[in-house]
Amino acid sequence: MATYETVLREAMSLPADERELLVCELEAETGRSGARAPGAGRDWDAEIKRRLDDIHSGRADLLDDDEFDRLVWGASKPDADTH
């Protein structure tokens, strides 16, 4: 039977996409939530970078607090004193 150290060493020698697939399989096998598709981390990193670039370049339309509240709550915004 393989030891933890042997399996870990062999897993670490895999290409990154195969390591991600292994992580997904292990998470699914153990019933842990958060299992994700291989490459999802890279995809999210790219999306976050794109959004930050849009903000820093001025391409993103940002909302101030009042605009956000109107968009989310409309006329039915809860009173802050009731929470």
Image: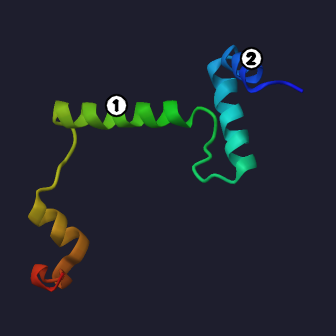
**Residue 66 point in image, percent of width and height:** 9, 65
Q: How is the image coloured?
A: rainbow
> Could you tell me the amino acid type at mark 1?
Lys
Residue on which the image places disc 2? 10
- Give the residue drawn at x 66%, y 18%: 12
In terms of secondary structure, where does tag 1 sit?
helix
Above or below for 43 versus 18: below
Q: Nearer the viewer, residue 25 or 6?
A: 6
- Give the residue drawn at x 51%, y 34%: 41
**Residue 81 point in image, percent of width and height:** 10, 83
Q: Nearer the viewer, residue 56 or 23?
A: 23
Above or below for 14 versus 55: above
Above or below for 38 versus 33: above
Q: Is residue 20 left or right of residue 62?
A: right
Q: Residues within 10 Å of mark 1 (few under 14, many from 20)?
A: few
Quadrant of residue 2 in the image? top right
Q: Nearer the viewer, mark 1 or mark 2?
A: 2
> Could you tell me the amino acid type at mark 2?
Glu
- Location of the N terminus (image quadrant): top right
- Give the residue drawn at x 70%, y 25%: 18
Quadrant of residue 70 in the image? bottom left
Q: Is residue 61 left or right of residue 17?
A: left
In terms of secondary structure, where does tag 2 sit?
helix
